[in-house]
Image: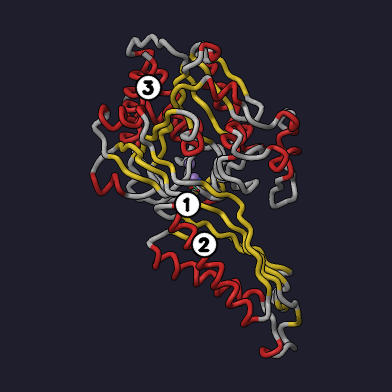
Amino acid sequence: MSAERFAALWESLSPVGKAGDDGGYVRHSWTDTDLVCREWFVEEALDRDLEVEIDRNGNLWAWWGEPEQGGAVVTGSHLDSVPHGGGYDGPLGVVSGLLAIDRLRERGVKPAKPVAVVVFTEEEGSRFGVPCLGSRLMTGAFDPAKALRLRDREGFHLAEAIGRAGLDPERLGPDPERLARIGAFVELHIEQGRALDHLDAPVGVASAIWPHGRYRFDFTGEGNHAGTTRMSDRHDPMLTLAATVLATDEVARMHGAHATVGRVDVAPNATNAIASRASAWLDARAADGETLQKLVDAIRQRAERRARLDGTQVAMATESLTGEVAFTGDVSRLAALELHAPVLPTGAGHDAGVLAGHVDTAMLFVRNPTGISHAPQESASHADCAAGVEKLTDLLGRLCQ
Ligand code: HGY
Ligand code: MN
Ligand code: MN
């Protein structure tokens, strides 16, 4: 696969959802932009004589062979992005999956098992707040009734959003039959770090995904006039929020973990009013579950201690929690042995992490020279992307024959 050939397919999708002059992408699930991305996928799949279907949770599947046969070798990823994210996180796995099918055919591979490319919906959780929602619903890892009540920042319910796309919200839920038909899942993804750059390797194999959780902190205080309220009379939730953000940074460093507050919401959010309430979302990740729990407990305790000082109240709710994923199955071992590529862990979550609990799963990473992700500066050379397609083709070829 040449870099030029990879670029040809890549550039047929890359203009979709590019937002503003920062070069970032805004591709949120079930929006018009997402529907254009989904149409792009369907067209590319039909151009390859693949059978396209949308499952009860809105995930898209493009089949080479009959799914009913079982033991399917599935690859793919997601097309949604974080707000103003990079263009490779997700789409690289989908484009590479389509090109790997082209390459398998060119190599004369006659699969003994069905092969599919999947697009999981709402992987980033950027619109409805739960990451890997499509794969979690399929595997029964998330309650469909709870999912229907999820709302985006404009108050739109998931049920309305998927209904608008023609799906029946009542059908949302576990899909054990579909899951049972998958023999192996391989997700190719841009590396969200610089390990491969440091190792001077274009492609790597995942060893593990760190456990990670998302938590919502709600701080309540006393709204009042910014100009007439004495400092000693205030109960300002912004102070408790600010102390919690600083504690997050300090505690994460002490635990050798990664913890971030990247999203806040303040009311009434007025220049001349002391906030009455504020919310902050914590993204916390650590190399093991015990460290993650200690990290989050320590942050919560620091928030509660500061709240007593400020005369405010704080409440923390867990929005999602994903345990550690170790890629130790046959498919990962095969990848590590046959692809002659370095093996490395990641702190980023993926649908592969959700499927790993049910199906023999592996992940391949493609070098990201900036190491940046979830931001417009995310990048990968098309030569490395082409190398990723070849390695993915190698692995899928071994798995489907
Ligand atoms: O947040 C993550 O780790 C993933 O990119 N959704
Ligand atoms: Mn991501
Ligand atoms: Mn991703």
Label 3 Cα neighbours within 10 Å, binned few <14 / some 14-19 / many ≥20: many
* Colouring: secondary structure
**Residue 396 bears which disc, if any?**
3
The front one of 154 and 241 is 241
Q: Position of residue 190 (x, y in %)?
A: 40, 40
Q: CA distance from mark 1 to mark 3?
A: 30 Å
296 relative to 335, above or below: below
Question: Does any portion of residue 9 appear in the rendered image?
Answer: no
Q: Nearer the viewer, mark 1 or mark 2?
A: 2
Q: Position of residue 6 (x, y in %)?
A: 38, 28
The front one of 149 and 175 is 175
Q: Callout 2, which amino acid? A: Val
Mark 1 and mark 3 in contact? Answer it, CB < 8 Å: no
Label 1 Cα neighbours within 10 Å, binned few <14 / some 14-19 / many ≥20: some
Q: Quadrant of the N terminus?
A: top left
The front one of 93 and 114 is 114
What is the secondary structure assignment of the residue under circle 1? Answer: loop
Q: Position of residue 120 (x, y in %)?
A: 55, 33
Q: Callout 1, which amino acid? A: Ala
Q: Callout 3, which amino acid? A: Leu
**Residue 188 bears which disc, if any?**
none
Q: Nearer the viewer, mark 1 or mark 3?
A: 3
Q: CA distance from mark 1 to mark 2?
A: 25 Å
Give the mark nearer the N terminus: 1 vs 3: 1
Q: Quadrant of the C terminus?
A: top left
Provide the residue designation for mark 2: 296
Q: Residue at x 59, y 47 (%)?
A: 126
What is the secondary structure assignment of the residue under circle 3? Answer: helix
Q: Residue at x 23, y 43 (%)?
A: 200
